[in-house]
C-alpha cells in the first residue's frame, strides 16, 4: 500500500496535490511519501518480530534512496543502514543513525574506506573475498583494533529476474563459496585484526518468489551449523535484501509476512541475531518522479511520441534494465485511450521510458507521475546532457519540504576548474 491516491480529482501524495509541488518546485522532481516509507518499514519489522525472529537489525540499503531526510525518517523508526561507500556511511551518520547499526558491504572496499569504517566504529564489515579480509585485518591491526566482520557467501542460486541485478550465482563477483567461507571464518577467528561475528548473503534484487531465497537461506543455515560444530562462534546472520515490489506488469511479489514466515521456518530453533538489508521494498513505492508533457510529436505513419521534460538522466531504470514503470497522468481525462512512446529530450534513442504504452490522451502541459520510482531513481540520476540534477521533495501529511533543491546552472559550472594552459 502507498499514499499516492486521487484526491479531489487529482493525484496527491498523502494530502498534498502533486500539482502544488510541480508549481512550487518545477518538474522534473522526485516526490516521496513519509507515511509510505514508515509503513513499509513497520510492516516488514512487525512481520519479522511476529514470527519470533527476535529484535532484528533492519539495515535499510542506503543505495536505494540515500537522501538524508529519507534516511532520518527511517532511522527515527529504528532502522540501521546498509552502506557501500564512505559517502553512504557519512549520509547514514548525518541522518543520526548510530555507527553500531551501520553495515558496510561491497566487493572492493579500499584501505582508506576500511580505515574510515573502523574509525567511526561501524557495527559490521561484510567481507566479500580473501584479499579484502586480509586488508581489513591489516588496517585494523595498524590501528591496534579488530574489525568486526561477517563473511559474505555466494550461495550459488539463481534469483530470477534481471541479470544485471542478480548477485547470487557463482559467476557473479559477489562473496565466497561455502567451503571458502568455512576456511576464512576459521582463519579470521585466529587473526589478531579480525573479530568474525557472522555470515551474510544477498542473492539479488526485485526477487518476487520466495523459493530462491529459501534455497539460499537453507544453505546458510547449514553453514552456520557447520561453523558452530567446529567450535566457532556465529552470533549474527545477515540475510541481505532483495524482496521485490509490484511494478504493475510483474508477478505479485511475496509479502513481507510470507517472507518472515519462510525465514522463521528455515531457521526454526536456531539462536542467532538476524539482520536484513532491504532497500526497494521500503523505498520504491514511496516515491514518484513527476514530469510535464512538453508536446506530442506525431509521425506521419502514426507513431505518437509523448515528449516529457524528464529524461533517462533522471530515471535510468527503463534504459538500463528495460524496467516498466506505471506512468499516471495526475488528472484523469475521459475519452478513447491512445498508444504512445513516452520519451525524454536527451539525444539518444535509449532515452525512451516506454514504447507502445496505451494510456489516456495526453496534451502539452499535462503532469504525469512515474510510479514506484522511490528506489534506484534519484540515486542513479546524472547530469548527462548538462541537465540539472533532479530535485527531491519529502511530503508528510499536508506539508512538503524540498530535501534536495534543484541546483542552478551556475552551481553546475562552479564545480569545474579551468586548466592553467587554457
Ligand atoms: N544488500 C546488498 C549487498 C545489495 O547489493 C543490495 C542491492 C541490497 C542489499 C538491497 O537490495 P534491494 O532490497 O533493494 O533489492 N539499480 C537496480 C538495483 C540494484 C540492487 C543492487 N544491490 C535497480 O534499479 O533495479
Image: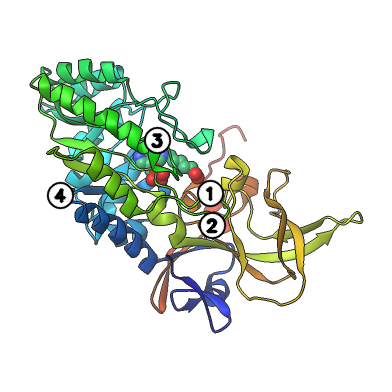
**CB of mark 1 near ligand 1 (< 8 Å):** no
Q: Which residue is mark 3?
A: 212
Q: Residue at x 10, y 28 (%)?
A: 233
Q: Is residue 55 above or below residue 237?
A: below
**C-alpha separation, residue under disc 2 versus residue under disc 4:** 40 Å
299 relative to 8 in the view: left or right: right
Residue 351 in the image, given as x and y percentages of width and height: 68, 47
Residue located at (37% from left, 55% from top): 282
Query: What kind of element bears circle 3?
Result: helix
Give me the C-alpha separation between circle 2 and circle 1. 7 Å
390 vs 225, nearest the viewer: 225
| In the displayed structure image, the side of residue 97 where residue 294 appears, left or right | right
- Mark 1 sits on what residue? 381
On screen, residue 134 above or below 349? above
Q: Residues within 10 Å of mark 4 (few under 14, many from 20)?
A: few
Sequence-first tag of 3 and 2:
3
Packing grade of label 2 (10 A; few <14, some 14-19, many >=20) is: many
Separation (CA) of disc 3 from disc 4: 24 Å
Q: Which residue is mark 2?
A: 390
Q: Earlier in the sequence, mark 2 or mark 4?
A: 4
Amino acid at each position: 500500500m502507498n499514499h499516492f491516491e486521487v484526491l479531489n480529482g487529482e493525484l496527491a501524495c498523502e494530502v498534498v496535490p502533486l500539482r502544488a509541488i510541480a508549481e512550487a518546485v518545477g518538474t522534473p522532481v522526485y516526490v516521496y511519501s513519509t507515511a509510505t516509507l514508515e509503513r513499509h518499514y513497520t510492516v516488514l519489522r512487525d512481520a519479522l518480530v511476529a514470527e519470533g525472529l527476535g529484535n532484528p537489525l533492519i539495515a535499510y540499503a542506503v543505495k536505494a534512496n540515500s537522501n538524508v531526510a529519507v534516511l532520518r525518517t527511517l532511522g527515527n523508526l529504528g532502522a540501521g543502514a546498509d552502506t557501500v561507500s564512505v559517502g553512504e556511511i557519512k549520509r547514514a551518520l548525518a541522518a543520526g543513525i548510530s555507527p553500531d547499526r551501520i553495515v558496510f558491504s561491497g566487493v572492493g572496499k579500499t584501505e582508506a574506506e576500511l580505515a574510515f569504517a573502523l574509525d567511526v566504529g561501524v557495527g559490521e564489515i561484510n567481507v566479500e573475498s580473501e584479499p579484502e579480509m586480509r586488508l581489513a585485518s591489516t588496517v585494523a591491526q595498524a590501528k591496534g583494533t579488530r574489525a568486526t566482520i561477517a563473511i559474505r557467501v555466494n550461495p550459488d542460486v539463481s534469483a530470477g529476474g534481471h541479470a544485471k541485478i542478480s548477485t547470487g550465482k557463482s559467476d557473479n563477483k559477489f562473496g565466497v563459496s561455502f567451503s571458502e567461507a568455512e576456511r576464512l571464518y576459521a582463519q579470521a577467528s585466529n587473526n589478531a585484526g579480525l573479530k568474525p561475528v557472522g555470515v551474510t548473503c544477498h542473492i539479488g534484487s526485485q526477487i518476487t518468489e520466495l523459493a530462491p531465497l529459501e534455497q539460499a537461506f537453507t544453505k546458510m543455515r547449514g553453514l552456520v551449523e557447520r561453523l558452530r560444530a567446529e567450535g566457532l562462534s556465529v552470533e549474527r546472520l545477515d540475510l541481505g535484501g532483495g524482496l521485490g515490489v509490484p511494478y504493475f506488469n510483474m508477478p505479485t511479489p511475496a509479502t513481507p509476512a510470507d517472507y518472515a514466515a519462510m525465514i522463521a521456518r528455515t531457521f526454526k530453533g536456531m539462536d542467532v541475531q538476524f539482520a536484513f538489508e532491504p532497500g526497494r521494498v521500503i523505498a520504491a513505492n514511496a516515491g514518484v518522479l513527476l514530469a510535464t508533457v512538453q508536446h506530442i510529436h506525431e509521425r506521419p505513419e502514426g507513431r505518437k511520441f509523448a515528449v516529457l521534460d524528464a529524461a533517462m538522466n533522471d530515471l535510468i531504470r527503463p534504459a538500463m534494465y528495460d524496467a516498466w514503470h506505471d506512468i499516471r497522468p495526475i488528472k484523469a481525462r475521459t475519452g478513447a485511450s491512445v498508444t504512445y512512446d513516452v520519451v525524454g529530450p536527451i539525444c539518444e534513442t535509449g532515452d525512451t521510458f516506454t514504447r507502445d504504452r496505451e494510456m489516456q490522451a495526453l496534451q502539452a502541459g499535462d503532469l504525469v507521475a512515474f510510479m514506484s520510482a522511490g528506489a534506484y531513481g534519484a540515486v542513479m540520476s546524472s547530469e548527462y546532457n548538462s541537465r540539472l540534477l533532479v530535485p527531491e521533495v519529502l511530503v508528510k501529511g499536508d506539508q512538503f519540504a524540498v530535501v534536495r533543491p534543484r541546483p542552478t546552472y551556475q552551481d553546475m559550472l562552479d564545480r569545474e576548474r579551468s586548466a592553467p594552459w587554457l
